[in-house]
Amino acid sequence: MYNSKITGLGFYVPDNIVTNEDLTKMMDTSDEWIQERTGIKERRWIPEGSEDTSAVMGAKAARIAIERAGLTKDDIDFIVFATLSPDYYFPGCGVMIQDLLEMPTVGAIDIRNQCSGFVYALSTADQFIKTGMYKNVLVIGSEYHSNGLDKTTRGRGVSVIFGDGAGACVLSRTEDNNKGILSSHLHSEGKYAEKLTVLSPSIKKWVPEIFKNIDTDVSYFPYMDGTFVFKHAIVRFTEVIHEGLKANNLTTDDLDLFIPHQANLRISQFVQHKLKLSDDQIYNNIMSYGNTTAASIIIALTEAWEKGKIKDDDLVVLAAFGSGFTWGSVIIRW
Ligand code: UT7
């Protein structure tokens, strides 16, 4: 069996910075509330008139990752794309990457696991490489949240949290079994599907039905039972990190860098405290980008790598929790 390792990383965020102060002009909120509850100072939102979408941003991040891997688009065997904000209801964004990057007609799939999307996507790509089916898989996480948020006081509990952006990596075959992805651990608990969701349009409730009560129907905006999600997140994050470390006979002392899904700085800090990690063992950037869902881990991983925080042989752990509920971890020897 082969192993897989990350050979190239890239990310792209729109230039348009939206500060907490900017949000106070749209809704009843404050910089103090947002920073105190979430740690977020600013996020990027695609500005009006921009051609950026989840697929377009994903393609921009992918070009950087492929180049840094020392490859060309023609070396990529398969595309895995994670998003909850696809350009179309169908088809998914993966196929759009094939087109935008003018790649040969390689296969492409979309992963629909929201905040855990990148962890699921990386794990999926890893299986294709471990079985020997593919050599180089392009893995993308990208989100265009800002066009789908309720940016009024009614939606403030959700809309202040989310940002737009994309990250990508190339996962490549290696014959060194001590390097690369050591294992991944994935979970779901669908009974909580409606605790963090966009209910419609869906096949159960299509667009004309929303229009019947357009002034009161908010089912097409993201809904989150924030406190409920928070309580589950801190438990599941901790569990799935321990599960991953234990599977590899490792402990938190072995961990060089933990990159949590950037859901809320308070969640990351709680998990850091619970695992007794030093500030050098964790990387957070939610302060600058907000929660970019499927893109958050890969943006943070890329940024940490660019800042020289990841060295050869480091033990890097990625973990996520979110809508579904879904959660998971990936254990990497760099
Ligand atoms: O990434 C996927 C997973 N997502 C998460 O893990 C998110 C988990 N949850 C959270 O991060 C937090 O629950 C939130 C940041 C979403 C909310 O923080 P909270 O401390 O749970 O606040 P809350 O929802 O209990 O609301 C407290 C108060 C409410 O007012 P009352 O009822 O106490 O008068 C809200 O109406 O804060 C109010 N509020 C706001 N005030 C100012 C809610 N949103 C805002 C806002 N600005 N943006």
Image: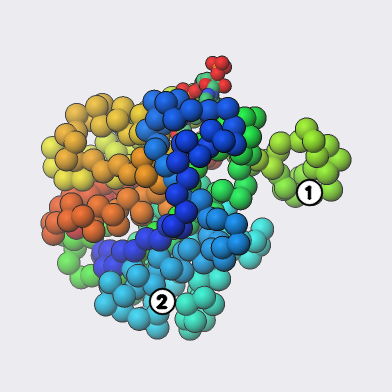
Q: Looking at the image, which is closer to me, 14 or 250?
A: 14
Q: Is mark 1 within 8 Å of ligand 1?
A: no
Of residues 56 and 253, the one drawn nearer to the viewer in this rendering: 56
x%, y% of residue 234?
37, 29
User: Looking at numbered disc 2 in the image, what kind of residue is underneath it?
Assistant: Asp
Q: Earlier in the sequence, mark 2 or mark 1?
A: 2
Location of residue 301 with respect to 238 vertically, above or below: below
Q: Is residue 103 left or right of residue 159?
A: left
Label of residue 101 in the image = none
Circle 1 SS class: loop
Q: Does 135 sit above or below residue 252?
A: below
The residue under label 2 is 77
Q: How many marks?
A: 2
Q: Identify the residue shown where x is 61% and y is 50%.
A: 147
Quadrant location of the N terminus in the rendered image: bottom left
The answer to whether residue 107 shows anywhere in this view is yes
Task: Identify which amino acid the numbered label 1 is placed on.
Answer: Trp
On screen, residue 150 above or below 226: below
Q: CA distance from mark 2 to mark 1?
A: 36 Å
Horizontal and vertical percent position of residue 85 = 57, 53
**Is there any visible trace of residue 236 in the rendered image?**
no
Q: What residue lies at 23% left-to-right and 70% top-to-bottom?
A: 174
- Looking at mark 2, is its residue's CB closer than 8 Å to ligand 1? no
Quarter of the image for residue 39 reads top left
* Tag 2 secondary structure: loop
Toward the viewer: 67 or 191?
Answer: 67
**Residue extending furthest toward the right:** 212
Q: Residues within 10 Å of mark 1 (few under 14, many from 20)?
A: few
Q: Residue at x 56, y 63 (%)?
A: 50
Position in image of residue 150 (x %, y %)? 63, 39
**The quadrant where residue 137 appears:** bottom left
Which mark identifies residue 206? 1
